[in-house]
């Protein structure tokens, strides 16, 4: 084929250096019925993207009717009379008109992408009561989180554990992320493509809890279809063997099919028309309830939630989450924090923060939309806006003597079948905790204390793999999860010492097994006794919150400076509980000023000075009044002198004339 | 930035007048003695005069503290006054306000402008030295007038009447008033020292 080895070598080098040559040809062939448009999707780089018919609106405000054909994972059309029913593929069905790969880059579908901003976000909290493990996991790599890969959690397990609140389309279908040991399980369960219905299905029968149920059964391929009102899915992929073949019943002959039938889907045949098209009631503007399924934060101690719980003031005013958290076809959702425009290098995002909408500044051209009032902030000096984010005074819960315990959808599996509804169900998430953010402003955060077993090599601490913990630590701890259902168990220092002692026997000389909990790292010293110290690896993990926004009358500062600047102000002195797995450690509390990065004594002195404010006002009033009185009386007197001078002057001139 | 520029202007003004005084042979010790009593104790047997002298000394010390606690940190950091400096500034402020108002009240009569002053002022261009007394009086009254926005601006900030934008405006007023007040205080000091120097020369 090649005339000389030199030619071959040259071509090989060219291909190695420019692999895009071959790739671009493949991607070009993806779309067939499209318009080619130049769109500045991130407002920074201009890309030429192949758009499909459903990607760009023609400007009509009505919602297009989605009477569409269903396609399976191989791209074949699904008919109502098909003998063997298979789930429809969203990639092929929705992807017929919408560019799937473009949407896939969206915020919700790229949980496995490293975050370019320094901003933290809610982690996936992995818990194992029996090994006292509570890990803030994230693929995005924000500071304080742990990568699932580093604890040996493969995407398959990650999806099974957290899939109830995952929209699909990332690690759940990325073949590069597959591990060898889960290869066959992926073949049985199928991939979880983006579930567009999570947000866009307007059908009241759409059931996200059913989606979660299917994830639990490892029916990943069936989950999206099962959540719609079009289909009904039964069966358990999780119970099927590795060599499961749906077309060959001999492969699962050993499974008790009365208890655990193979995955099967049934479509509502009446919904298919003569052309085998199905109508889906889809909406462009997502309802709040769809967002809240995954983004709920609720006070877990409120028993009278019926009375006390409030809506976000924007929601109460009739707005939708997506009015602010907008996105383009690329589904990159606007987060709405103040510096997002700088982080994402997009000036337009200035208008989508609290300030951008409410403050009539020159650079935010869209201020005032949706009738956003321009706040005067009477009596609030400007320094507050340099030091605090808007959310401090306006969002989350009003600070109390102790931080509140809250539940979140993702951490507590809210909205799915069988959650523990007890108030103090783990993980214990505390809110609001006022923390300095990446731009130096204080903002309210949620906080969780990690608890895990780790390997310490020199100064480096890395968490132990979950399989190792299950096999080696769980049997040593012998913790019963039934007697304290939902509550976090604690162990004594002696049990911890013995466990660490046993584990250290198995580890090499230069590494130690340590336990991290309640902000401390526990390890055995040379004398084999337990010692603990603070460590950056044990720091609590916090992530910012901006909702629910309270009404203006419930803002901090509305009752005066005393709301924060008083000696016992909860904004400074509210206590954050240290949640530890060691039974005498959980009693300690940390004052809020530590998280705020402020000096406690200075704040006390500063707050104390506010007691003299009335005196200061009185003195200033008296002094000002005195000075005004003196100045004006002498001005009057001076006027008299001037008048006298002119009078004398005129008389002198008269005398001279005479 | 504005604070830094103002601070530099104030320091420059101070340096210029100090240089002018030193050219006339007035050393810093003399300035301190004039301002903080010094030999005045012996000369002024009048209790009221002593009170005035003490009040002036206190006011000057307080003014210096107020100046340092506000101009210095804001010029360096470029931010709003905050932290320990703010506490010091706010703690001294009421005492300074009282002493300033009393000072104006007690010295007002002494610096009352009259017909002879107007005559002196007409010759200011030709004979500055002779018209200095009138100028001192004018500077005193300018200083008194400047202290009104200086105090009112901060008084209005203390009440939750105005929004943040207006508060920022009042802070600006306070800063400008404070700068003018400081410059006028330096000029007044210079003129008083000049007056003293000329009086001493005449006596000798």
Image (cartoon, coloured by chain):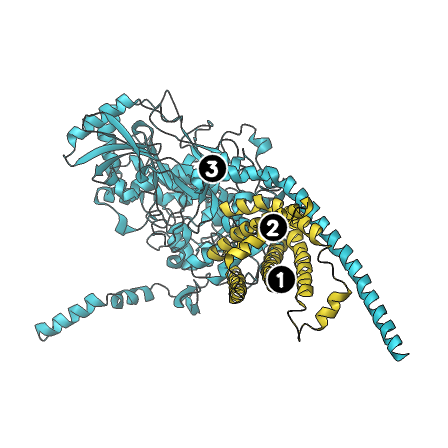
The picture's colour for chain B is: yellow
Q: Is residue A567 left or right of residue A151?
A: right
Write down the residue under mark 3: A601
Q: Is residue A226 above or below residue A132?
A: below
Q: Are marks 3 and 2 in contact (CB under 8 Å)?
A: no
Q: Secondary structure at mark 2?
A: helix
Tell me, yes or no, whether dots 3 and 2 are on the same chain: no
Q: Nearer the viewer, residue A213 or A491?
A: A491
| Chain letter of the residue carrying label 1 | B
Seen at 52% across and 63% down, the residue is B18
> Residues under labels 3 and 2: Cα distance?
44 Å
Relative height, residue A323 to residue A523 (above, below)? below
Count of marks placed on residues? 3
Disc number placed over residue B40 in the picture, else none: 2
Outermost residue, left side: A4
Which residue is denoted by mark 1 in the rendering? Answer: B203
Residue extending farthest to the right is A658
Classify mark 1: helix, strand or loop: helix
**Sequence-wise first label, 1 or 2:** 2
The CA distance from mark 1 to mark 2 is 17 Å
**Residue A72 rendering spot, x and y as whole percentages:** 36, 51
User: What kind of element bears circle 3?
Assistant: helix
Eye-nearest disc, 3 or 2: 2
* Residue A580 location, quadrant: top left
Mark 3 neighbour class, 10 Å CA radius: few under 14, some 14 to 19, many 20 or more? few
Q: Chain of mark 2?
A: B
List x then y, in percent, for residue A285.
Answer: 53, 52
Query: Are both tags, 3 and 1, on one chain?
Result: no
Which chain does tag 3 point to? A
Which residue is at the front of the view, B24 or B10? B24
Chain displayed in cyan: A
């Amino acid at each position: 084929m090649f005339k000389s080895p030199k030619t071959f070598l040259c071509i090989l080098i060219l291909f190695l250096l420019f692999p895009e040559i071959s790739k671009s040809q493949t991607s070009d062939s993806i779309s067939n019925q499209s318009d080619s448009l130049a769109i500045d999707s991130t407002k920074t780089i201009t890309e030429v993207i192949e758009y499909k018919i459903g990607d760009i609106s023609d400007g009509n405000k009505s919602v297009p009717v989605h009477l569409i054909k269903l396609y399976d994972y191989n791209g074949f059309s699904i008919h109502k009379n098909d003998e063997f029913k298979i789930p429809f593929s969203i990639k092929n069905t929705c992807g017929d008109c919408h560019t799937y790969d473009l949407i896939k880059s969206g915020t919700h579908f790229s949980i496995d992408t490293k975050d370019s901003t320094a901003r933290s976000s809610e982690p996936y909290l992995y818990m194992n009561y029996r090994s006292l493990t509570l890990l803030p996991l994230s693929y995005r790599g924000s500071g304080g989180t742990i990568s699932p890969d580093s604890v040996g959690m493969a995407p398959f397990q990650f999806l099974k554990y957290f899939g109830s609140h995952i929209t699909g389309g990332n690690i759940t279908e990325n073949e590069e992320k597959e591990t060898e040991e889960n290869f066959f399980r992926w073949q049985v369960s199928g991939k979880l493509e983006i579930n567009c219905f999570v947000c866009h299905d307007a059908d009241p029968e759409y059931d996200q809890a059913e989606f979660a149920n299917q994830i639990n059964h490892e029916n990943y391929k069936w989950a999206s279809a099962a959540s719609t009102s079009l289909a009904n899915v039964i069966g358990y992929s999780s119970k099927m063997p590795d060599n499961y073949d749906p077309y060959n019943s001999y492969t699962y002959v050993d499974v008790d099919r009365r208890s655990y039938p193979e995955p099967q889907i049934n479509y509502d045949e009446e919904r298919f028309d003569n052309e085998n098209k199905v109508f889906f009631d889809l909406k462009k503007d997502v309802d709040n309830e769809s967002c809240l399924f995954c983004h709920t934060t609720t006070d877990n101690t409120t028993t009278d939630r019926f009375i006390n719980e409030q809506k976000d003031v924007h929601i109460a005013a009739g707005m939708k989450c997506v009015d602010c958290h907008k996105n383009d076809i690329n589904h990159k959702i606007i987060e709405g924090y103040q510096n997002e425009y700088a982080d994402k290098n997009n000036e337009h995002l200035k208008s989508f923060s609290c300030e951008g909408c409410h403050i009539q500044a020159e650079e935010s051209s869209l201020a005032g939309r949706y009738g956003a009032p321009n706040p005067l902030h009477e009596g609030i000096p400007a320094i507050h806006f340099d030091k605090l984010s808007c959310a401090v005074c306006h969002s989350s819960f009003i600070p109390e003597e102790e931080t509140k315990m809250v539940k979140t959808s993702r951490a507590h599996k809210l909205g799915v079948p069988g959650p523990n509804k007890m108030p103090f169900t783990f993980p214990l998430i505390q809110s609001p905790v006022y923390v300095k953010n990446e731009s130096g402003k204080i903002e309210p955060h949620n906080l969780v204390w990690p608890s895990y077993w780790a390997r310490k090599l020199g100064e480096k601490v890395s968490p132990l793999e979950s399989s190792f913990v299950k096999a080696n630590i769980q049997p040593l701890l012998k913790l019963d999860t039934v007697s304290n259902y939902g509550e976090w168990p604690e162990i004594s220092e002696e049990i911890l010492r013995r466990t660490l002692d046993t584990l250290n026997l198995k580890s090499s000389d230069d590494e130690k097994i340590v336990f991290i909990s309640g902000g401390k790292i526990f390890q055995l010293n040379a004398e084999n006794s337990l010692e603990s110290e603070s460590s950056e690896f044990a720091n609590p993990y916090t992530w910012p919150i901006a909702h629910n926004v309270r009404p203006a009358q419930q803002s901090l500062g509305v009752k005066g400076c005393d709301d924060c600047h008083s000696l016992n102000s909860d904004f400074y002195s509210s206590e954050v509980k240290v949640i530890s797995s060691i039974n005498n450690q959980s009693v300690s509390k940390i004052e809020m000023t530590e998280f705020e990065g402020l000096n406690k004594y200075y704040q006390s002195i500063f707050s104390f000075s506010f007691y003299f404010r009335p005196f200061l006002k009185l003195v200033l009033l008296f002094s000002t009044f005195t000075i005004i009185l003196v100045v004006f009386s002498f001005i009057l007197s001076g006027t008299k002198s001037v008048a006298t001078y002119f009078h004398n002057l005129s008389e002198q001139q008269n005398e001279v004339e005479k | 930035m504005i604070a830094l520029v103002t601070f530099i202007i104030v320091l420059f003004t101070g340096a210029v007048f100090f240089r002018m005084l030193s050219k006339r042979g007035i050393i810093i010790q003399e300035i301190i003695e004039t301002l903080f009593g010094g030999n005045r104790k012996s000369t002024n047997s009048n209790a009221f005069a002593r009170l005035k002298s003490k009040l002036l000394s206190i006011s000057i010390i307080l003014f210096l503290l107020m100046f340092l606690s506000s101009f210095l940190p804001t010029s360096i950091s470029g931010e709003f006054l905050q932290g320990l400096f703010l506490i010091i500034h706010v703690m001294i402020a009421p005492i300074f306000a009282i002493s300033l108002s009393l000072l104006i009240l007690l010295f007002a009569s002494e610096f009352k402008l009259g017909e002879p002053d107007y005559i002196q002022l007409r010759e200011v261009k030709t004979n500055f030295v002779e018209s200095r007394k009138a100028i001192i009086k004018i500077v005193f009254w300018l200083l008194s007038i400047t202290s009104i926005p200086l105090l009112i601006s901060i008084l209005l900030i203390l009440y939750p009447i105005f929004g943040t934008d207006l508060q920022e405006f009042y802070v600006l007023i306070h800063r400008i008033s404070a700068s003018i007040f400081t410059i006028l205080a330096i000029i007044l000091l210079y003129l008083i020292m000049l007056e003293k120097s000329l009086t001493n020369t005449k006596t000798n």
